[in-house]
Amino acid sequence: MNEKVTATPPPSTDPCAFRPNDGVVFATGLEREHWYQLTNRGNSGSVLAPYLPNRVYQSYPNNVSRVAMASAPRGQFVQQFQNLAGTHEPQTAFKFALPRSDVYYWRFYRQYEPGYQFTCESKAFSIYAHNPITYTLPAGERPNSTNEVSCFLQMMPNCWYDNRSMMRRCFDAEGVNTRSEPVLYCYHLDQPTGYGEKFRQNIGEPTYITSGQWIDFHMMMKRNTPDQADGEIKLWINGVLKMHHTGIRFRTVPELQLNAVSLGGYIGGTCTSARDQKIWDDHYMVATTFITDERFAALCETKTEWFDTGIGYDWDLDRRCWPGVSCLP
């Protein structure tokens, strides 16, 4: 039962072939019913996917599902988040371990249903550094430079409190909730309060998003050299660079590396969803290098699971088992 089978690389002509040198470590177009098993990442100490012995999810979290959509930007299926009035739902999300790296780019599409009310913070695709990977920093607690940091793509409501400038901001008239301001919400060593800092767009005029349209979000997070203020974050919206912050201190030890991704639709902060309403995501991708349009256009699923050793293993998605380990003959 402990036998491990090394993955066989697909033909080089396959546009979705696993190529360690191209930087892609996570990709899914959500076209396979059990895509969340194919894209799972694990390591021997991980509790991120707590379904031993294979460390794979067996079902969707509450109020999250895979649905067909004619307007999907890639393929036919998307991931749907159901917000429920008066709640933070969905409060849980798929979370996968990644190969450890000092830099990651992550990219995906998101749409809020027509008429969506942006009255609360809306969290999305997130990158983490856990040390060890089983550690979780409590919300509102400062990182200690060795244990955890993270960056969330987050959509802010019209009026929100900026903990860096210590002022409440509104970009539309009070009470208007038809637009949202994308920010990167990051935990780092010099954040102004116990909660993470909301980094705003700082290139050109801010881009605000509205409901009923697909938005292409592309982010980058680069760890600082230990004890030096040279960390960076970037955000592109529909292919346009809208944010680039430098001089950020995330860590003091080299062991604190990016090693997990979360695919969330949590409605949070101090408020809850104003009504029942939906959010849709499509085509998640994570890479150690810039994700070009050509690379992003390929409707691929990642082919391997990565362990901390860097050894790849096949997962049989159709039989939902490990070949040579848990698959019946």
Image: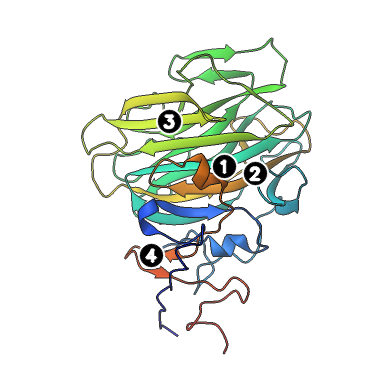
Quadrant containing the C terminus is: bottom right
Q: Quadrant of residue 1?
A: bottom left
Q: CA distance from mark 4 to mark 1?
A: 24 Å
Position of 84 with respect to 44 (left or right) is right
Q: Earlier in the sequence, mark 4 or mark 1?
A: 1
Nearer the observer, 92 or 43: 43
Q: Are marks 3 and 1 in contact (CB under 8 Å)?
A: no
**Which label sits on residue 108?**
1
Q: Which residue is mark 4?
A: 307
4 or 2: tag closer to the N-terminus: 2
N-terminal of the pair, mark 3 or mark 4, is 3
Residue at the spot of label 2: 281
- Decide which of tag 3 and tag 1 comes sooner along the chain: 1
Q: Secondary structure at mark 2?
A: strand
Q: Position of residue 48 (x, y in %)?
A: 48, 58
Quadrant housing residue 272 = top right
Horizontal side of residue 201 vs 248, given as left or right? right
How many other residues sit within 10 Å of disc 1, few (<14), some (14-19) or many (≥20)?
Answer: many
Upstream in sequence: badge 2 or badge 1: 1
Q: Which residue is mark 3?
A: 234
Q: Amino acid at mark 2?
A: Asp
Q: Secondary structure at mark 3?
A: strand
**Closest to the observer: 154 or 88?**
154
Assess whether mark 1 and mark 4 are in contact (beta carbons under 8 angstroms): no
